[in-house]
Image: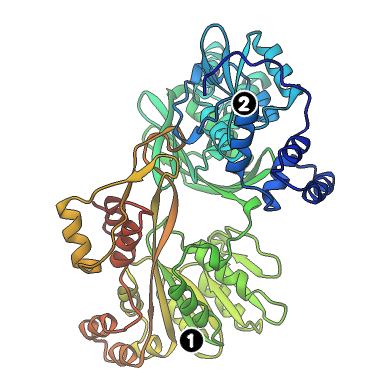
Amino acid sequence: MTESTAPRPRKARLGDLLLEHKVISKEQLETALADQRKSGRRLGRVLIENGYLTEDALLDFLSRQLRIPYVDLRRYTFVPEVVRLIPEAHARRFRAVALRDDGDGVLVGLADPIDIFAHDEIARFLQKPLKLAVVKESDLLKALDVVYRRTAEISGLAAELEQELSAYDIDLGLTPGAPDAVNDAPVVKLLQTIFEDAIQVNASDIHIEPDESAVRVRFRIDGELRVQTTADRKIAQALVSRLKLMAALDISERRLPQDGRCQVRFRDTVIDVRLSTVPVQHGESVAMRLLNQSNGILELDRLGMPAPVLARLRALIHKPHGLVLVTGPTGSGKTTTLYGALKELNVPSAKLLTVEDPVEYRLAGVNQVQTNAKIDLSFARVLRAFLRQDPDIILIGEMRDTETVEIGLRAAMTGHLVLSSLHTHDAVSSALRLMDMGAEPYLVAASLRGVVAQRLVRRICDSCGEPADPTAAERALFSEVLGADTLLRLRRGRGCAFCQHTGYRGRVGVYELLEITEELMFALQRRDPEGFHRAALNVPSYRRLRTEALAQAAQGITTAEEALRAVYGVA
């Protein structure tokens, strides 16, 4: 469809247009209007959610009736300078994005192109004729988070803070009486912008790292660290001091590591920030884990586990006693899985106790204890106290030492369900690791019921994913691991604005579950690692991590390179 300068939309209501062209019935419109009055949502969104028409059908209808093009934002290459012709606040309010500036007019994508008020306000602001296009609202909201990044703003605020510090020639970390204008305004604004940008791109961590001549800010997105900005090292201590104040830490102590937590808010989102400082050669390095409390705790059936694995895990956690372990490296989603299980088990008839370092998620109805080394509140000490609290279910954040392992195993053997995590490579090595930590073989054999090992792999971006032909090496690998008759639906991401040109967006879990059979128990009692490994491979329901990861790749969820990287660390 050809583009032309769009006339002001005629005053028409979406419902009337759809009814006039018999796209929906009068009864459907009346029901949708009633729902709209209750919820305040747009009529188009209500019609889609009620199942009266699909979003694609609505967009196609608007495109034909208004004679304007439909633009697929998932495959559109955004130009930052053009996008910023419309301020972010206006873009979000009017569900609009500037796509192209032709000199004689600006092509603007609108989720609701018959919204006269939105058309007039954007035209008034741009002071240029508008060329309209219709875009999918769900894609538009994702696009706004991507295109209105705060990279330039962060760099500008960092430069402003550097000039401020140079003017006063002070060190904020050492001068409690420094002027408020230096201490607060630039630092707070910079940190606020860093947090906003990190939340907007769904970063899991923020790292602030001073070097000899610069300070580097990095975000971990989908498990990968990416440099957000670098600035003069002079501002590093100002940032660290302000973060320490937010987390109620000692700003005068720079020689020792410190841990704390605070909360930040962005729009309607509440983020719990777990902060850790470590003294390094050129100052203090800060790592912050961002935990989105607004999302709540994921339920087990939303973790992406294969149905057979989920059913077997549910059977294990609903047993009255025994130890169930979740294993994997840091950042593999162990806590999410454990809390998903805990949420399912959290019923009024059961008493649940957790001991963690730190408590990451707060769960109503569960008694949660955070360890504190300063007052000797250790895992073992809390666990001994727990056994006098008449618990049904105990969650141990991590099996860290011999005493914790032994108490946890004895609790599992004496009528309690115990959930815990362990840092091991796979499910098979976990049981053997407990014995390496000093647990008696008979105790492990009698208490351990099952082990989940997991990894997180990056998903192929939905916006730029496309079919891919397997290489000879990939075909041989899939044939060896999954079988020669495996149907391959391989895909790869080209890279686009939505995935920051990586080809991946979001992550999905890969799981293996080993249930302890009688043969495995005998091998544990004999302390026979080789026999245990052989017996595990003979368990019919056991599928190794490598197999599960490559199965995800064969289905086009991730790539073979990513599957192997997640399981082995290399492609």
Do we see residue 387 in this rendering? Answer: yes
Rate crowding at label 1 as few (under 14), some (14 to 19) or many (20 or more) other CA atoms within 10 Å: some
Res. 410 mark: 1
In percent of width and height, residue 204 lies at: 49, 46
The amino acid sitting under disc 1 is Arg
Figure check: 78 above or below 449: above
Rate crowding at label 2 as few (under 14), some (14 to 19) or many (20 or more) other CA atoms within 10 Å: some
Residue at 38 percent of width and 64 percent of height:
328
- The residue beneath circle 2 is 189
Disc 2 and disc 1 in contact, CB within 8 angstroms: no
Residue at 56 percent of width and 34 percent of height:
145
Q: Disc 2 and disc 1: Cα gap in Å?
A: 52 Å
Figure check: 504 above or below 234: below
Residue at 47 percent of width and 46 percent of height:
257
The amino acid sitting under disc 2 is Lys
Residue nearer the viewer, 233 or 188: 188
In percent of width and height, residue 139 lies at: 55, 38
Callout 1 secondary element: helix
Residue nearer the viewer, 152 or 359: 152
